[in-house]
Amino acid sequence: MKGLDSYCAYPKDVKSLLEALREREAETIRIDLPANKLRFVSLEKALEKYKTVDDLAKRMGIEPMLVNNTLDNAKMIVVADGSPYLIGKSSWISVSGRIDIYGGGFAELEPDDKANVINARLKQLDNSQVKVIIVSGKVRAIMSKKYSPIPANETFEAALQAIRNRFADVQYMVGYYDHEIAYVKLLFPELAQQLTEVYGIPDTLVPGMLILTSDTGHAGVRIAACWKHPQGSFRQTDSEVYVKHENLNGLGKVLEEMPNLFIKYQNAAVKLAAMLNIELQHPAIVTKKVFKALGVGDKHAKATIELLPAVGATAYDVCMEIFSLPARLNLSEAARLELEEKVAKAINFDYEKIDADI
């Protein structure tokens, strides 16, 4: 159900993604007010007044299931200028940022004690302005005044239009959204054919673009060149635009930078084509060294080595299997994207030198 802390969706195509994000924006409330107009209350204390979950849900104009979901997670309500809202689990990182309280000790406090600590800190902030963001019945972030989010649906619509103006053939790879992030990966098959003809890289490699954003406090807008291959996908680390959601930053700044991404696909194509001709004498050791440099666990290096050709493994083989790691693991979307960003740097290593130095 929408609004639950665990809610996420994988729309089947771009149209469905845009429709879902427009709907989410219609269910989004952003309130600007002084910090001292916020008051946190434990959900248990609120239920002492309203007696039942149904009564409290009716008072808040939400489904009882959302109240029960909050009882299982954040266990808190915030009253913003007299109106009560449930706290979503994902909002804690931004709440901690506003009150400048971090660490395991605070997280382990009982809800009533936690509410008292937060309220005392909010009083100290006095008239400092904050922005409260409510999506689908729950607070998803409490940000500073300078936070100026671009709604996710607007980000995607504008970026997609810029991409379609550049590429005649655009295909949908995957899309995702939850209460923290939204992203889409698009593919450019026509460009893939051109790069294969010019640089001789395998025709299974298809260039594309990742559009990633959050309008609830966890990120700015990130647009990056990416590639799809049979084992997964990877980003192009030298080709991305990142704009924070703050002050006067807007879509114009994002769109200005996008043309620079479009001309850099050849950078990756040149590197990958060169890797095809580098046969490694010590592929297992090279793989371990690259994994260590990337800061990725040794157990993943061992599993990757088992996937390499028994004879004649090339730098390209090693690089492709490293790129496939995020697709091989059972990860949350946020963790998967973080790992994709790490392994993307595998394209920048000098595999021939690493092999020669062993």
Image: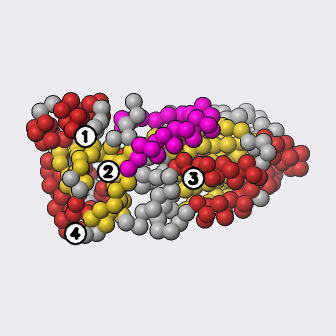
Label located before the other in sequence (4 or 3): 4
* Front one among 162 and 231: 162
User: Under tag 1, what secondary structure?
Assistant: helix
Say which of marks 2 and 4 sits in front.
4
Query: Can you tell which quarter of the image residue 47 is in?
Result: top left
Question: Closest to the observer: 234 or 93?
Answer: 93
The span from disc 4 to disc 1 (Cα, nearest Å) is 26 Å
Q: Which residue is depicted at the point 23% across and 34% down?
A: 58
How crowded pointer 4 is (Cα within 10 Å; few <14, some 14-19, many 20+) is rated as few
Residue 274 image point, x, y percent: 81, 52
- Mark 3 vs mark 2, CA separation in Å: 25 Å
Q: Which residues are magenta?
A: 4-29
User: Mark 4 = which residue?
Assistant: 126
Q: Secondary structure at mark 3?
A: helix
Is the C-beta separation of discs 2 and 4 under 8 Å? no
Which element is circle 4 on?
loop
Quadrant containing the N terminus in the rendered view: top left
Residue 137 locus on image (x, y percent) = 33, 41
Q: Are marks 2 and 1 in contact (CB under 8 Å)?
A: no
Q: Residues within 10 Å of mark 3 (few under 14, many from 20)?
A: many
Callout in the foreground (3, 2): 3
Q: Amino acid at mark 1?
A: Met
Q: Earlier in the sequence, mark 3 or mark 1?
A: 1
Camera-nearest label, 4 or 1: 1
Residue 282 is at least partly visible in this image: no
Marks 4/3: CA distance? 34 Å
Task: Look at discs 2 and 1 and give the one toward the viewer.
Answer: 1
Q: Any magenta on residue 127?
A: no
Count residues near mark 2 (Cα–Cα under 10 Å), then give few for <14, some for 14-19, many for 20+: some
Cα–Cα span, label 2 and label 1: 21 Å
Instruction: Read off the residue under disc 2.
Output: 92
